[in-house]
Image (cartoon, rainbow, N blue to C red):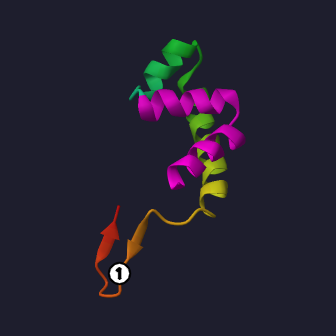
Amino acid sequence: REYSAVRKAVAQVLTPVQREAVLLYYYRGMTITQIAQYKGCNKSSVSRTLQRARRNLMRVLQYLPTLSRNTEDGSDDSL
């Protein structure tokens, strides 16, 4: 359920350029330099795009329930 909400947030909040940068960086494992070369732009543009994407996602994701829950004894009951 939470992952579905994350996917929906990504689709709704990020611009197409931000979405592509996030996918290339986090899912394809490309570096900022590699993304810049692939897109034909400079590294600072890629960095700014990723910063804006993270900021936009944080605004939305802060309202989602946490993926890990603490148990009564203080231990972490992560999924």
Location of residue 48 (image quadrant): top right
Tell me which residue sits at (59%, 62%) in the image: 64
Between 44 and 79, the one lying in front of the other is: 79
For the view shown, which residue lies furthest in the front direction?
1
Q: Main secondary structure of the magenta part?
A: helix
Tell me: 51 left or right of 69.
Answer: right
The boundaries of the magenta stretch are 1-27
| Total number of numbered discs in the rendering | 1
Between 22 and 1, the one lying in front of the other is: 1
For the view shown, which residue lies furthest in the bottom direction?
73
Secondary structure under the numbered disc 1 in the rendered image: loop
Q: Could you say where residue 46 lies in the image, as x and y percent from the top left?
A: 57, 29
Mark 1 residue crowding within 10 angstroms, few (<14) / some (14–19) / many (20+): few
Q: Could you say where residue 67 lies in the image, as x and y percent from the top left?
A: 45, 62
Tell me which residue sits at (57%, 15%) in the image: 39
Please, what is the three-letter code of the amino acid marked with disc 1?
A: Thr
Location of residue 60 (image quadrant): bottom right
Between 32 and 12, the one lying in front of the other is: 12
Q: Could you say where residue 47 lies in the image, as x and y percent from the top left?
A: 55, 34
Tell me which residue sits at (62%, 34%) in the image: 49
Q: Is residue 49 magenta?
A: no
Residue 63 to residue 33: above or below: below
In the rendered view of the protein, which quadrant contains the C terminus? bottom left
Residue 47 to residue 43: above or below: below
Tell me which residue sits at (28%, 79%) in the image: 75
Q: Could you say where residue 24 lies in the image, as x and y percent from the top left?
A: 48, 26
Tell me: 74 left or right of 44.
Answer: left
Q: Is residue 24 magenta?
A: yes
Tell me: 58 left or right of 69.
Answer: right
Label 1 belongs to which residue?
Answer: 71
